Amino acid sequence: MLHDATPEAIRDDAYTYTRADWPQLFARLRADQHVHVYAQEAAVNLKVLRQLPERVPVLIDHLGTCHPERGVDDHAFAALLREASERGNVYFKGPGYRTAIDAVAAVPFAVQIVKRVGAHRLLLEASDAPHVRAGREGRAYANHFTPAAAFDFVARLARATAARTGTTADALLRGASAEIFPTSP
């Protein structure tokens, strides 16, 4: 959980996740487990991803960024998707309202994930709504969304993304869940 971390606060080398108990944690992960990374900044998600062992599956929260104003062509977001595609075991999760409160504004980010990483690497029906904390404007997410409104948001996001990518909304809502959360051995 690197919620408010800035890119400058994260080292560029593997120092952080190779010292102390981190290697022991990674060695203990079962095949049905992954590392969940959450940061508002795509650049922070990217720096952390590059430090994690390539064999470790990673789930990046909130579509990889909470800055829709930077657009999908943002260098850090594009680099994050490129790295995720190359690794092949990186997933992105929604529901996407931390990326943008307006589902229409979140669609380009979900579309880019599908195009660059694959629909099988996106799980939109992941909702912890109403999310704790507040958006950038200071309004609590619980004031934006009821649980039903959060699921409505994600359904609209899935349908719009599916229409632009040739996949199905159901695949975007639940398709990756079996891979991300396989039945324990």
Image (cartoon, helix red, strand yellow):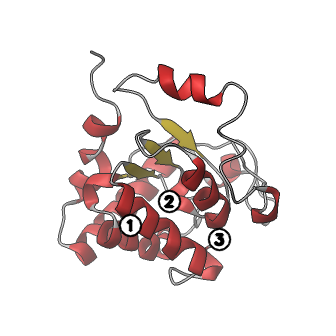
101 on left or right of 82: right
Per the rendering, the mark at residue 67 is 3
Q: Which element carries disc 2, helix, strand or loop?
A: helix
Q: Classify mark 3: residues with Cα within 10 Å, few (<14), some (14-19) or many (20+).
A: some
Per the rendering, the mark at residue 113 is 1
Q: In the rendered image of this protein, does residue 141 appear above or below residue 99?
A: above
Q: In the rendered image of this protein, does residue 88 appear above or below residue 19?
A: below
- Name the amino acid type tagged 2: Leu
Q: CA distance from mark 1 to mark 2?
A: 8 Å
Q: Classify mark 1: residues with Cα within 10 Å, few (<14), some (14-19) or many (20+).
A: many
Q: Which residue is mark 2?
A: 63
Residue 65 position by quadrant: bottom right
| Percent position of residue 100, x then y | 58, 67
Q: CA distance from mark 1 to mark 3?
A: 15 Å
- Name the amino acid type tagged 1: Ile
Q: Tell me if residue 66 can be seen.
A: no
Q: Which element carries disc 3, helix, strand or loop?
A: loop
Q: Which element carries disc 1, helix, strand or loop?
A: helix
Q: Tell me if residue 162 can be seen.
A: yes
Between discs 1 and 2, the one toward the N terminus: 2
Residue drawn at 49 percent across, 75 percent down: 78
Between discs 1 and 3, the one toward the N terminus: 3
Residue drawn at 73 percent across, 28 percent down: 20
Residue drawn at 36 percent across, 63 percent down: 85
Residue 158 position by quadrant: bottom left
95 on left or right of 74: left
Give whichever of 38, 54 is nearer the camera. 54
Q: CA distance from mark 2 to mark 3?
A: 10 Å
